[in-house]
């Protein structure tokens, strides 16, 4: 019997990556209702969708992700990332459907000098981070059967992201200045999507042994933004795509409205221990992403 999945936020990077991952799998039946059909801030719409599709698991990829804009739109960020996530979790609990909810490294302040584990204290330094942390709390409170996945530095051939921005800039200039004092674990969205589908299978096949809770899911290894840019351009040159030299700058040289964690590295050992799931190295993700873009960039925003 096929695994039935209901994914919110299907138009975003991760939602589209999940759609791509399951497209040819006869063992998965997945639906990706758009916001017109399923607005997760509408409790009645959520209940109706769960009743209509009868999923084995719900994957919540819907989020307000404009980090800087959130500083001026706090109410909207909290409405989507916190209140709506809580409503979705409550509907899942009422229907006895487990929920996989996507969260972020921005729940941490970045002051730790080692990779963050799930047990580390949270202390977000931006509206976006606070809204996502509140979403985690509401999901955990409303739905006992939940897996919250914190991820970081997500990129793909879909939508807008750092990889596509670097390639676009390289088409117009020979050198780009990139922050070198923020460290993280870049994550290729299709790699994360494959991990999520694997988790969904485990949840459906053996729900009695699932260790519900919070887990970290990001690309293996670590780098800074400048190092990521250099890797992007190295792979771009292999496909005769635009590439640029990278000049290291500090965070203070590139002010943004929202503060970013200086350390976004995530320890993903608990995910592997609990589910046997391990994402590929971040460089593998960059290589696959650039190769996909070289074959035909996705121009959708």
Image (cartoon, grey):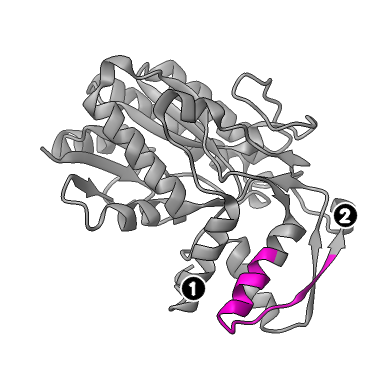
In the figure, is residue 8 to the left or right of 150?
Answer: left
For the residues carrying marks 1 and 2, which lies nearer the camera in this image? Answer: 1
Q: Which residues are magenta?
A: 231-247
Question: What's the CA distance linking mark 1 and mark 2?
Answer: 29 Å
Task: Say which element carries label 1.
Answer: helix
In this rendering, the answer to whether 131 lies above or below 172 is: above
Residue 109 within the segment the image draws in magenta: no
Judged left or right of residue 16, residue 259 is right
Considering depth in this image, is 36 or 145 the residue closer to the camera? Answer: 145
Which residue is label 2 attached to? 250
Q: Residues within 10 Å of mark 2 (few under 14, many from 20)?
A: few
Query: Can residue 34 be seen here?
Result: no
Residue 157 point in image, percent of width and height? 48, 66
Q: Which residue is mark 1?
A: 293
Q: Are marks 1 and 2 in contact (CB under 8 Å)?
A: no
| Membership of 237 in magenta stretch | yes
**Residue at image coords 49%, 33%:** 149
**SS category of the residue bearing label 2:** loop
Could you say where residue 114 lies in the image, as x and y percent from the top left? 75, 31
Badge count: 2
Q: Can residue 129 be seen?
A: yes
On the rendered image, what quadrant is the N terminus found in? top left
Badge 1, how many Cα within 10 Å: few under 14, some, many 20+? many
Name the residue nearer the viewer: 135 or 152: 152
Q: Where on the picture, by quarter, is residue 221?
A: top right
């Amino acid at each position: 019997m096929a695994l039935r999945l209901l994914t919110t936020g299907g138009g975003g990077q991760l939602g589209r990556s999940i759609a791509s991952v399951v497209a040819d799998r006869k063992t998965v039946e997945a639906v990706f209702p758009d916001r017109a059909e399923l607005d997760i801030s509408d409790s009645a719409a959520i209940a109706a969708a769960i009743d209509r599709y009868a999923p084995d698991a719900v994957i919540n990829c819907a989020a307000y992700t404009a980090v800087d804009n959130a500083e001026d739109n706090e109410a909207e960020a909290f409405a989507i990332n916190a209140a709506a996530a809580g409503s979705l979790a409550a509907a899942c609990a009422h229907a006895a459907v487990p929920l996989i909810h996507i969260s972020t490294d921005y729940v941490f302040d970045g002051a730790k000098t080692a990779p963050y584990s799930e047990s580390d204290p949270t202390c977000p330094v931006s509206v976006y981070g606070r809204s996502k942390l509140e979403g985690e709390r509401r999901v955990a409170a409303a739905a006992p059967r939940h897996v919250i996945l914190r991820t970081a530095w997500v990129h793909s051939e879909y939508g807008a992201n750092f990889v596509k921005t670097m390639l676009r800039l390289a088409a117009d200039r020979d050198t780009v200045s990139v922050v070198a004092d923020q460290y993280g674990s870049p994550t290729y969205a299709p790699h994360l999507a494959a991990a999520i589908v694997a988790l969904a299978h485990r949840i459906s096949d053996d729900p009695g042994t699932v260790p519900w809770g919070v887990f970290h899911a990001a690309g293996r290894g670590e780098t800074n933004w400048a190092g990521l840019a250099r890797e992007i351009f190295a792979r771009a040159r292999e496909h005769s795509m635009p590439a640029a030299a990278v000049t290291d700058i500090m965070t203070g040289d590139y002010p943004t409205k929202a503060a970013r964690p200086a350390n976004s590295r995530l320890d993903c050992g608990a995910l592997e221990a609990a589910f046997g799931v391990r994402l590929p190295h971040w460089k593998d993700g960059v290589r696959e992403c650039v190769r996909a873009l070289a074959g035909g960039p996705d121009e959708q925003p």
